[in-house]
Image (cartoon, rainbow, N blue to C red):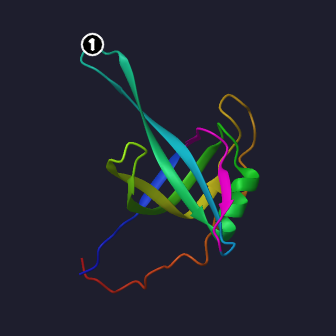
Amino acid sequence: MSYVNKAILVGRLGADPELRYTADGTPVATFRVATTETRKNKDGTKIDKTEWHRIVAWRKLAEISGEYLKKGQLVYVEGSIQSREFEGRDGVKRKAFEIVASTMRMLGGKSGERSAPAAGEHVDEDFPHEEEDDVPL
């Protein structure tokens, strides 16, 4: 049986990406993307609900993210959901969930700016892709 772990997000960056390098020199970028869902309550009033997603990009995708992505920019991110445990400053163990990006596409400028969509799509070739099986539905 095959399982699927895939997340697709279209949202705006909350801040410029942070680009760092591991001890062996591998680039890694982290940034947060906000997605907002709008719906109406029983009174017909529109209610916005915003979710924040932590994104982690590696290698070439990290370098591109660090160089070209800016706060407020609309972006498409595709990847897998990953959990990570860590110990907080208060000594309490915590669990964080993040999206490990495999594909990123820059969709436009900052919120409120009028600009043509950017043609910036990159697929991380080093990201481990699984072979597709012929699974009858």
The relative height of residue 63 versus residue 73 in the rendered view (above or below) is: below
State the residue position of label 1.
43
Which image quadrant for residue 109?
top right
Give the position of the N terminus as an image quadrant: bottom left
Q: Residue furthest top?
A: 43
x, y percentage for residue 46? 38, 20
- Looking at the image, residue 81 sits to the left or right of residue 22; the answer is left
Residue drawn 58% across the image and 49% down it: 31
- Looking at the image, residue 122 sits to the left or right of residue 33; the answer is right
Q: Which residues are magenta?
A: 11-23
| Residue type, label 1 | Asp
Q: Is residue 76 visible?
A: yes
Check disc 1: other Cα within 10 Å, few if <14, some if 14-19, many if 20+.
few
Is residue 12 a member of the stretch shown in magenta? yes
x, y percentage for residue 72? 64, 36
Q: State the SS at label 1.
A: loop
x, y percentage for residue 120? 71, 58
Residue drawn 70% across the image and 49% down it: 69
- Looking at the image, residue 89 sits to the left or right of residue 3; the answer is right
Give the position of the C terminus as an image quadrant: bottom left
Q: Residue furthest front?
A: 91
Q: How many numbered circles are shown?
A: 1
Q: Nearer the viewer, residue 134 or 22?
A: 22
